Amino acid sequence: MSPDKITIHDIARILNVDSSTVSRALNDSPRVTEKTKNRIIAKAHELGYQRNDLASNLRKNKTNTLGVIVPRISRHFFSSAIAGIEETSYNLGYNVIICQSLEQLEREHNNINTLVANRVDGVLVSISMETKNYEHFEGLRKRKIPFVFFDRHLDIPDTSSVLIDDFQAGFDATEHLIIKGCEKIAHFSGPMHLEIYKNRCEGYKAALLKHDMEFSEELIFSSRLMEQDGVDNVNKIIELPYKVDGIFSANDVAAISALQQLKRNGYKIPEDIAIVGFSNEAISAVIEPSLTTINQPGFDIGKRAAELLISQITNSNKNFINEKIVIQASLVERDSSQHNMAF
Amino acid sequence: MSPDKITIHDIARILNVDSSTVSRALNDSPRVTEKTKNRIIAKAHELGYQRNDLASNLRKNKTNTLGVIVPRISRHFFSSAIAGIEETSYNLGYNVIICQSLEQLEREHNNINTLVANRVDGVLVSISMETKNYEHFEGLRKRKIPFVFFDRHLDIPDTSSVLIDDFQAGFDATEHLIIKGCEKIAHFSGPMHLEIYKNRCEGYKAALLKHDMEFSEELIFSSRLMEQDGVDNVNKIIELPYKVDGIFSANDVAAISALQQLKRNGYKIPEDIAIVGFSNEAISAVIEPSLTTINQPGFDIGKRAAELLISQITNSNKNFINEKIVIQASLVERDSSQHNMAF
DNA sequence: TATAAAAATACAATCGATTGTATTTTTATT
DNA sequence: AATAAAAATACAATCGATTGTATTTTTATA
């Protein structure tokens, strides 16, 4: 009987009022008397009216929607960051559109276009491994759409980001291995054009330096840190003419596959080689030996990033302020690093 | 200099043509001559024009967007289903809005409202554990928005779904334990108002029956299958006056926490108690002993569900056809079930 | 009761793109 | 060159809600 798409005009016609009055009533404007307001609300409810946000957003030029771009939602860190983002957004009345770049620059580009076309009010990004330049972000800036990087970021002027202190975390992880008695520590790094990996690596170097240990390029393995990379790195390490007794990997995925590959080759963890990962994936607590790793508070990072972005949306004068929030990451000490050599 | 939001009217004014011509040119309509088309496209590109999908969608009454509602994206099964959904959608020109119900009915309700307000063309749902009735889905139907359940579904008439054969999978899991020599098998189930858990449980019962094994209500533990539930269930099991030597859990999370709790209590897995889980979370391959489980092909399920939904969107006469697609799940045999009692 | 002030509601433009119809321009045919 | 047919483009309504301004109605005051 009633059409499947009810509009304010339908309600207006039925009640013999103007559609503007209906609109105001449904938005609880003081310009409509309580009595008509009630009539309108009742009728709207009766007909199952549901506002068309497309029309509303078009007119208001505001969507109350944030775009989120992450490499993949299946990574523990990203899904917990998204949970944090959603928590904040939900409380402050924003919707969230989630996009995956799948680590591909082209996808990331498309994601941005989609978000712009849908006129999101702001964007939260953790960039793909392929992302080296920031021209596609300039499009956001030109359109005055604020964006905030979280975790994986680019070093663009006048851009905000919410990060952990990767240098410090890399330093802590490495120093932990040193304290546990490791004397030859390899480092698995990600693509070096990404700030986070660069910084973790710098932390690694700084820890070596502090403890008067020799640094060698040969012990840095840069890759995309996928499962296969951990295996490949281990295969190279065990071919080296000297003994490596510690590994600091810039993510858990590579750390774990390395751990398994070492076990397959008869190495004892942590006695022969101690390992520290990065990110604290769920799996790391459960593998044997359990993996010492750096906990990145994903939920917190997401929350803070969303808060920062929304504050920039709200305060248009703060739009392209350079604001960096650094959150402390902490070492989670587990079994894989209990090297404890007698020496 | 140029305003930050370029519209077709801006382009039209500059080139001295009508905005309708600009619109047609940008949509590659045959009604615009090649020459003007090129002029318009060039200018649009020069100005960094980006269509306002809000306006376009409003006018066309079609958003080319699918809504997806899942309990949480951090579960391996759901994130791989989403990957499958995105793959199909991306190829067929659809965007995807992902919502999490966080297992809460109220959130699921809000999710639906948001998706309706944003006028998605269709919805893919895997319901929350709290969801018992389907009144909020009736709203979708009234508005002629097609929806497809995947995995966790409700038994609503004239509704499509993409499922695995939970009965068969439950049967296979249980029979596997029986073949391995288990004689007293407990079952961890989810909320019984959810079809999937009901069916897995029925499969469990059927396997017992086939092998002339006694079924006892006491050995069915219904919960939300969270980590704590696995622990609680184990605590109850070890208090029983008889010996349980097998567990079939309707998800991996509970299976794994049970496994750990059993180990903490000095039980040997699989010698004392064999365990089979469900879902094949990443963690299951890595825990020790590795967990035998049922692999749910999440990516495939997502793909098929998106295909089905889009076909219903495209064929409006197929809108509320009852179409069930059943995908086969398979047992992944690992260490936790190698019971092999001599008897 | 007239009149001003205030309250309630109606009118109409607008957001940006799409699309059916009308008009103008071009091309083809005699 | 005249005319019809076809091609290209312009006009104008529309999608559904919002919002500034204008008008009507109600209330308060003299």
Image (cartoon, coloured by chain):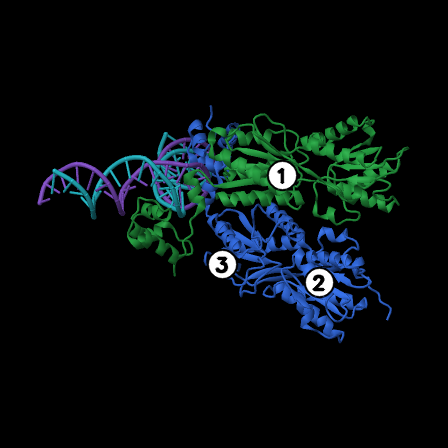
Chain colours: A green, B blue, C purple, D cyan
Q: Quadrant of residue A3?
A: bottom left
Cα–Cα gap, marks 3 and 2: 38 Å
Amino acid beneath label 1? Arg
Q: Which percent across, then down, holds residue B204?
A: 70, 68
Q: Quadrant of the C terminus of chain B?
A: bottom right
Q: Which mark is residue B136?
A: 3
Asked whether the residues under marks 1 and 2 belong to the same chain, the reply is: no
- As drawn, the residue found furthest toward the right would be A241
- As drawn, the residue found furthest toward the top would be B1
- Give the labeled residue for mark 2: B235
Q: Which percent across, then down, holds residue A182?
A: 83, 35
Amino acid beneath label 3? His
Compare residues B18 and A270 and report the one nearer the observer: A270
Q: Residues within 10 Å of mark 1 (few under 14, many from 20)?
A: some
Residue at 42% from the left image edge and 56% from the top image edge: A4
Q: Quadrant of residue D9?
A: top left
Q: Residues within 10 Å of mark 2 (few under 14, many from 20)?
A: some
Q: Secondary structure at mark 3?
A: helix
Cα–Cα gap, marks 1 and 2: 48 Å
